[in-house]
Image (cartoon, rainbow, N blue to C red):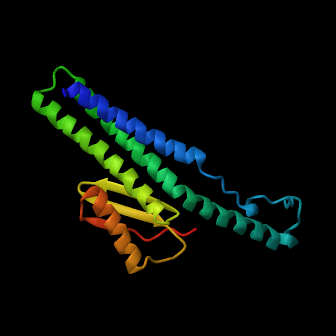
Amino acid sequence: MNKNQAVIIVTLLVLIVCAGVLAAKVNSPLYVNDSNFNTNDTSGLDSGNSTVNNTASNKTSNSTDTISKSNYFADSRLSRIQTDQKTLQELKSIIDDKNTTAQDRTTATQESIAITTDSTNDTKVENLLKGKGYKDALCTIENDKVTVVVKCNTDKLTDKQLREIKDVVISVTKLRNIEIGPPVND
């Protein structure tokens, strides 16, 4: 396999991962919080009814917190994918540049393969953790360190859950430097 074929394979793997993430995002159910829809118009009320306005604003701020928590995983995945794509594009331009030395081309090819492998492993870990019963999961691999955040109903993960997450990460990535962040609640 020559270098051009390796670059094509790496690019296709990245596109497959992107398509999978976008398909999951598009096919995910829409969550609507009823407190977002306030049918009472409070704009014409006098200052004597300020508690009604405060209650409405508190509901809005609570729903904003819920929305930002639910978007955390999707936004983080999207950011990770965009960063990976930008880096892969820069590496591809180095590989395609005729003035680049053979050693730099080899290094760029190895880095692009590593990024693609990490991206694939991120997705595998996330899917396996969802299969274990977690509502959502986010996995990032950087410099031989794996960081995992899961979405569940508890404020703190049990020792069994921590072991389960570590086992999944080790089985997929073969890395032992694992950081498990506090769970994100609904």
Which of the pair 125/54 is nearer the observer?
A: 125
Q: Is residue 97 left or right of residue 72?
A: left
Identity of the residue furthest to the bottom in this view: 159
The residue shown at (85%, 69%) is 47
Q: Is residue 102 left or right of residue 117?
A: left
Which of the pair 21/91 is nearer the observer?
A: 21
Q: Quadrant of residue 85?
A: top left
Q: Number of numbered discs present?
A: 0
Point out the image quarter for the C terminus. bottom right
Q: Is residue 100 left or right of residue 24?
A: left
The vertical placement of 66 against 30, above or below, is below
Query: Residue 89 at what x, y percent from top left?
Result: 32, 32
Query: Residue 167 at what x, y percent from top left?
Result: 32, 67
Q: Quadrant of residue 172?
A: bottom left
Query: Residue 138 at what x, y percent from top left?
Result: 43, 58
Point out the image quarter for the N terminus. top left
Query: Residue 162 at what x, y percent from top left?
Result: 37, 73
Which of the pair 36/12 is nearer the observer?
A: 12
The vertical placement of 125 against 21, above or below, is below
The residue shown at (34%, 61%) is 147
Which of the pair 142/55 is nearer the observer?
A: 142
The vertical placement of 133 against 99, above or below, is below
The residue shown at (36%, 52%) is 122
